[in-house]
Amino acid sequence: LSVIIPMFNEQEIASKTYVRLSNVLKAHPHELIFIDDGSSDQTLEILKECIQKDPGPLERNRVISFSRNFGHQAAFSAGIEEAQGDCTVIIDGDLQDPPELILEMIKKWEEGYQVVYAQRRKREGESLFKLVTAKVFYRILNSLTSIAIPTDTGDFRLMDSQVVDHLRQLPERSRFLRGLVCWVGFKHIGIQYDRAQRE
Ligand code: UDP
Ligand code: MG
């Protein structure tokens, strides 16, 4: 299992995220691929320290460091270039996406689903502005495209290596990953979760 985690100025939570992911995934051979997206705080140093202390079960945990802030979609693209797992998970680094859900995603993958996306049942601690704009954004997006993009999802998802291979081949540089993942097709399923507050 490959796990891609974008991080931008997350020094307060970086080591907690590292430990929680490592613990949750104990039973599965995995590599954690952190992307430090040009943080101006200690995120990179903290991640390096975590990796030194615990390089992971395959000793493949690592951090890719960007030369400046490119945005988290670019971070995902970099992660996808590196991921070598039979399946790959994309997850936010601020623990708003619960790492425990990855275990449920793996179960669905074992049942034969090639994309398992997490769908928010409720969102704690988000402003009314964010909730309304998010809703409007997905409604407009879906009215503009013939590809069905599930509402109330973020990038938090598991993808089979076959899907990841196809994403790697797409020529787009400025990417909207959760749209492209729908565009490439394959067998999808959503699982519901309650989105926590940013820790
Ligand atoms: N992030 C990133 N680059 C950025 C902004 C955010 O890598 O320029 C990371 C951030 O550290 C987090 C994830 O992307 O792990 C999601 O960002 P954020 O929590 O700000 O998004 P939201 O939860 O509001 O959707
Ligand atoms: Mg967040």
Image (cartoon, rainbow, N blue to C red):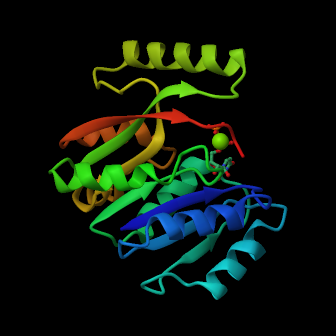
Residue 113 lies left or right of residue 131; in this view the side is left
Choose top left, top right, bottom left or bottom right for residue 62.
bottom right
Choose top left, top right, bottom left or bottom right for residue 192.
top left
Residue 35 visible? The answer is no
Q: In the rendered view of the protein, which quadrant contains the N terminus? A: bottom left
At x 67%, y 78%, the residue is 50
Q: Residue 106: x and y, percent?
A: 30, 56
Front one among 177 and 2: 2
At x 25%, y 42%, the residue is 184
Q: Residue 35: x and y, percent?
A: 60, 64
Residue 167 lies left or right of residue 109; in this view the side is right
Residue 105 visible? The answer is yes
Residue 39 lies left or right of residue 155; in this view the side is right
State whether residue 193 is above or below residue 135: below
State whether residue 127 is above or below residue 14: above
Q: Residue furthest right?
A: 41
Q: Residue 120: x and y, percent?
A: 47, 30
At x 53%, y 64%, the residue is 21
At x 55%, y 59%, the residue is 5
State whether residue 96 is above or below residue 11: above
The total number of labels drawn is 0
Q: Residue furthest left?
A: 112
Q: Residue 169: x and y, percent?
A: 31, 57
Please state the quadrant of the image where ligand 2 appears: top right
